[in-house]
Image: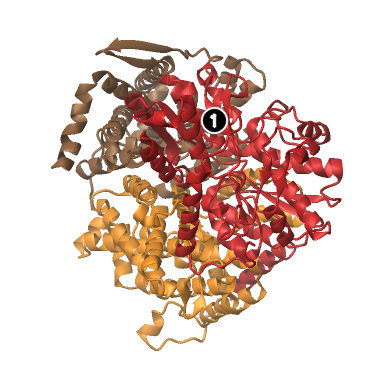
Amino acid sequence: MDVLWAVLVQPFVDMVSAPDFLLQVLWDGFVGGVLYALIALGFVLIFKASGIFNFAQGIMVVFAALTLVGLYALGMPAWVALGLTLVVMFVLAVAVERLVLRPLVNQPDIILFMATIGLTYFLIGLGEFVFGGEPKVMITEALGLPTGMREWEVFGGVVFFQEIDIAAAAIAIVMVVGIGVFFHYTRIGRALRAVADDHQAALSVGISLEQIWVIVWFTAGVVALATGIMWGARSDVSFALQIIALKALPVLILGGFTSIPGAIVGGLIIGIGEKLGEIYWGPLIGGGIESWLAYVIALVFLLFRPQGLFGERIIERV
Amino acid sequence: MFYREAGQFKTSYRADMAVFPILQDRIGLGVILFVAVVLVPLLGDDFFLNTIMIPFLIMALATIGLNILTGYAGQLSLGAGGFMGAGAYACYKLTTYFPDTNILILVLASGLVSAAIGIVFGLPSLRIKGFYLAVATLAAQFFLEWCFIRIPWLYNSNASGAIEVPGRTGFGVMLTGPSASPEARYFAVLGLVALLTWIASNLVHGRIGRSWMMIRDMDIAAELIGVRPLRAKLSAFAVSSFYLGVAGAMMVFFWLGAAEPSSFSINLSFLILFMTIIGGLGSLVGSFFGAAFIFILPVLIRAAPRTFGIDVAADAVQHLTYMIIGALIIVFLIVEPHGLARLWQVGKQKLRTWPFPY
Amino acid sequence: MTLKRTLTATVLAGAMAAFAAAPAFAEGLYIPLLTYRTGPFANSGIPIANGMNDYLQMLNERDGGIGGVKIVIEECETGYDTQKGVECYEAVKGKKPLFMNPWSTGITLAVIPKANVDHIPVLSMAYGLSAAAEGETFPWVFNPPMTYWDGASAVIKYIGEQEGGLDNLKGKKIGYLFLDAGYGREPIPLLQDLATKYGFELLQYPVPAQEMQNQSSQWLNVRRDKPDYMVMWGWGAMNPTAVKEAAKIRYPMDKFIGVWWAGGEDDARPAGAGAVGYKTLNFNGVGPNYPALQDIKTHVVDKGMSKVDAAKFGENLYNRGVYNSVLMAEAIRNAQTLAGKPDVTAEDVRKGMETLEISAERLKEIGLDGFMTPLKLSCTDHSGHHDVYVQQWDGTTWKPVSDWFAPMTDVVEPLLKASAADYVSKNQPWPARAEPCS
């Protein structure tokens, strides 16, 4: 009985008795979720356009942030460094397309997946070789991002909002809307969707696959840069960040591999779900369950809906 | 000229279906075994045995394990490290309870524990497949890692939170612990790996192996002709986890000597997956090639500056190793996506027709 | 079939040729340094590696080595990874190293039993296996100047002092934030003992290694529980993240105390003004204003032989690396005196370490007056329970805020004995010490 009470009732009593704290938990979960969603967004973009499960998205986040900080450390103004980082990400996209994707056209998914893991190793080595292994401090102020803190007195307590987190949420929304508009209303966007639907049909109406891939990888690079800046501002820019990027995988499962809204909603569910779980249920089994809770949520979810929230239904034919 | 089966007639179906139907192959196998059993321990020094041969064989066994699941049964898994950990911790507990039992038996028994855990985490495979399944196996990876840290019973409540290998014997010889000689450990590893490889070869060529491959190639069709997906998939998970578990137990007991939970992290899973794919999916000999390539190459790269007296900073070597390995993986996938095993086959084919290829 | 044979032969021959050359005996005092300038813990590993290297280099440059014999330094990169660490151990083993510096708890644990057989002294300076302090059981392992248990007891002692006596801890809440691995878990039994003894409540906040940079849950819990003090056992990227999060929830920083490994400048600096007031334990002096460090500057850094960033010269973790090398150098010097010859063996060095005494006068002599407390090891005690002090971050540098004080040796000692006995019982057969202490 005690166990049932502790699992089923007590957490909710805790939630209601300290609503200001609950609000803080939800906000922190929301912010974490936004960042997961951004990483997942990078995955989805590439998966949609090329069917590649891009494992390197996590290291691209680190690499982009490192490049930005590294260029700034050379003494150039923040905005120039930002611009140059975008150039580097573009070069990376072109290089990936030329050197990795083009020779591997028509290979099975798992081979392409492995190629992106190879790319991950390469980028880890290159990043550490060029910028050194020690973590860097993100140049939040130089980029003009707010660093203060807002307080909101509510329910007899205080809820803290970091301005950087608010900015992260705002930037994420702008980016998602931007990408959505881009996909729906521009020529390239339509071409992208055509490629996502059917490679061969797209080819036959004269869409250049190579060009689309470069664009998609570049967009994913931009998303990675934004994620890197946001996450770097929260802790540090270091290679340990790429492990967190794995958290985007359960997000993808929840949202479906091909759905942009899915990535966002999935990210928020995972972000908020794991915070609630860790804070209210974690202590029952010793805490620290965040490292696998997201995967288990996703796994349970999969058993009921294998294609994810917004994924396309898998139809099997013999 | 030498590698040709002309003149070797088969008189029975059995002979025709043998795993090594050609005499030269059998001789080759004999030579490899001779090198492994006699030459390596005779000529190799401690470093060669401890840092190259023992880990290489263990990694090859783990690769065979993952190959059974991913290569033969087509179920992508990123949880190999977790299952290896399960085997290692099981073996540690078993040695605690049965200190006098032959350690080789305990190592094999710990594979059974790992197999049972594998079946549990294999259950989702009945509903999901492909990358979705890969993510599901990540759940196993992280959950098991958490268990290794959080359940003090698993590591006998050691203050260090790690498992330390006590000295244990098999056939009256000290096989584990610091006082076991590298040669003894090498022979233990070699024996187990050879035995398990032989069993794996029989499995994949037999009825179970065929049902795995049917499931891999087209699961619905396999179901229609009477392969039970439940049994085939779960048996693949069980056998694969058994191999991984044995490899994990050997890794700690015959190689590292002590292990923290972080030894079985996600990085190990990726390493094993690399070996599987570089070696060639669905090939046992490929597993050995893959393990050799991915494991030995970095050791050689790292040892190179030491050996040739080039003064390169240790960290730069490490960075370069990452870059070279990453680039080589991509190059390999481009040149030969079916892995080293295919190159091997092509090479053999070329040799067979040499010097008159047409 | 020739192909197969040729291949095998080539691989074998190549591999053997590569390693045949490896165990060429190094001329001089061979000291391999296992370092990690890569990987998730590199921020802590780089300054330590530089410090260790530079002090030994300085001895070579200034004095021509120790006792006239050059020191041969070789770095081996581990990336804080146990497998690679064991590989490094095997690679240097053949060259008869005088010391192993594993620099990771995992590698230390793997190396301890091997060192016993291979007869290589292992110096795990204030990390690794606490029980290794028992010289009777672990003749080849040294963990001066103190163990984690000493550290944990010192933190509690310090908190007690702040509260005006250990008895005032009754009813207080002390939070313990730790890296969820052997390293962070080790102090828990001792903290629990002290909690029952002094009546405070111990709250645990584990940080999983893969979530090092994502600690908002732990700090939300801290915010809810409102502990009176926070103690941190962190490493690598975990530290700056924790300091940032603490600042974010406005935890009173002067009640947030880290272990010595959480006391790097780079741990506090990223949090900016929010980190002011953060405290950690320490056992070495900070800053470049010691004659020996000035010698490093003139003989090594200014000659461009060091990898250290000029601005980071003399920072805390760099000096910790220097400390590590000072211990090795002094032990070798002691061994040379004992053995009566300059080219000492590992066995001599082990004896030199066991009878190591660095007195205050000796510290003055080597230009490290006030850098560390005088240190003395013995055959039975390989750690020594030496004094620590508390330092505080003032926004730009660490400032000492307490005198040197001793840990609660009486509490730690029985735990060490029990733990060493436990280790031996679980690792039977454990080789007995060749020549018993006294």
Q: Colour of chain A?
A: brown
Q: Position of residue C401 (x, y in %)?
A: 58, 24
Report the residue at 62% width, 36% height from top.
C283
Asked whether the viewer can see residue A208, the reply is no
Q: Is residue A232 above or below residue A298?
A: above
Report the residue at 73% width, 63% height from top.
C23
Answer left or right for A123 relative to A223.
right
Q: Chain C is drawn in which colour?
A: red
Answer left or right for C57 relative to A107.
right
A245 and A2: which one is in front?
A2
Asked whether the viewer can see residue B130, the reply is yes
Q: In this view, does A66 lie above or below B9?
A: above
Q: Position of residue C38 (x, y in %)?
A: 60, 41
The residue tagged 1 is C280
Q: Place residue C370 in its image quadrant.
A: top right
Count of residue discs = 1
